[in-house]
Amino acid sequence: MTEAPVLTIDGPSGAGKGTVSRIVARRLGWRFLDSGAIYRALAWAARRRGVDLNDPDAVARVAGEMELEFICDDDVKVLVDGEDVTDRLHTEECGRIASKIAAYPQVRRALLDKQRAFRRPPGLVADGRDMGTVVFPDAPYKVFLTASAEERARRRYLQLKAQGLDVNLDQIIKDLEERDRRDREREESPLVPAKDAVVIDSSDLSIDEVVDRVLALLPATVKNPSGATVSSGSGGEDQP
Ligand code: DC
């Protein structure tokens, strides 16, 4: 049996991968993998269990043991060992720990199969840092979505402010640059575009424009297997 097609969308934090990936997945009627949420869930589980976060083997053991479930309704819910932790994964602290433990080769290896298990018909949109380089190197469609550090920090600032949080733009820029540096410079699966990825800079593009550019990379037969018309604006998110 031929494997289900995969569209990988990699890039640094704040480039818009999550939003774009979700819209594209809905549009195509494909499954969606938020691999960052897996690293965040592990960060949460390791901390919850009181594991030494500086011990790669201990954190990797948690990765093997934890039961991870994604429930996809209108929103994606993440369950760790049966507990809904969705709301706890988006804190800056959780992101920082996730970035730290994501540098451990043992951890990345322990999470490979969990991520590959998402590849099922009719297809998968996979959002992350190494989706096109390591997890799904044979994916037929690959995007590397980026944006300037200032623009990414500005988006994150607006997002956190909208959640009512007291945030400081300079601190966000500092955190973002630190996380980027760690994700790019780690030895294991660093954040780099796959050789066969199409690079899209979203700094001056709207979400609709990015979605259009991503969808334009897929052949009509994939976007539209039954021959029905598929619109490319973001208005019809619920329609496959
Ligand atoms: O996309 P995100 O901010 O939710 O990801 C959280 C951290 O997880 C990020 O700093 C790096 C790590 N990560 C990774 O190393 N590889 C992935 N495929 C996804 C995330």
Image (tube, grey):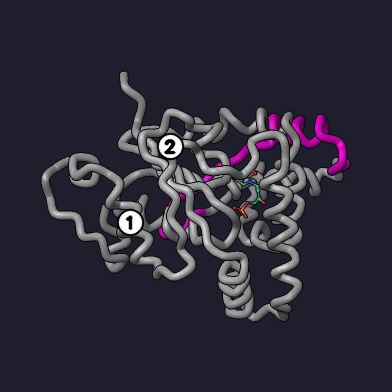
Q: Is residue 44 visible?
A: no
**Residue 207 rendering spot, x and y as whole percentages:** 40, 66
For marks 1 and 2, the one nearer the N-term is: 2
Indicate which label's residue lies in the foreground, 1 or 2.
2
Toward which corner of the image does residue 51 lie, by quadrant?
top right
Whether residue 50 appears in magenta in the rendering, the answer is no
Going by the numbered disc 1, the residue's amino acid type is: Arg
Q: Residue at x 64, y 36 (%)?
A: 189
Placement of 163 over or under 175, stated as above or below: below
| Separation of residues labelled 1 and 2 (CA atoms) | 16 Å
Going by the numbered disc 2, the residue's amino acid type is: Asp
Placement of 1 over or under 96, stated as above or below: above
Name the residue carrying label 1.
213
Placement of 104 over or under 237, stated as above or below: above
Determine which of the numbered discs, if any, sits on residue 196 in the image: 2
Placement of 227 over or under 172, stated as above or below: above
Toward which corner of the image does residue 164 lie, by quadrant?
bottom right
Q: Along the horizontal axis of the image, is 124 left or right of 174?
A: left
Extent of the magenta region: 52-76
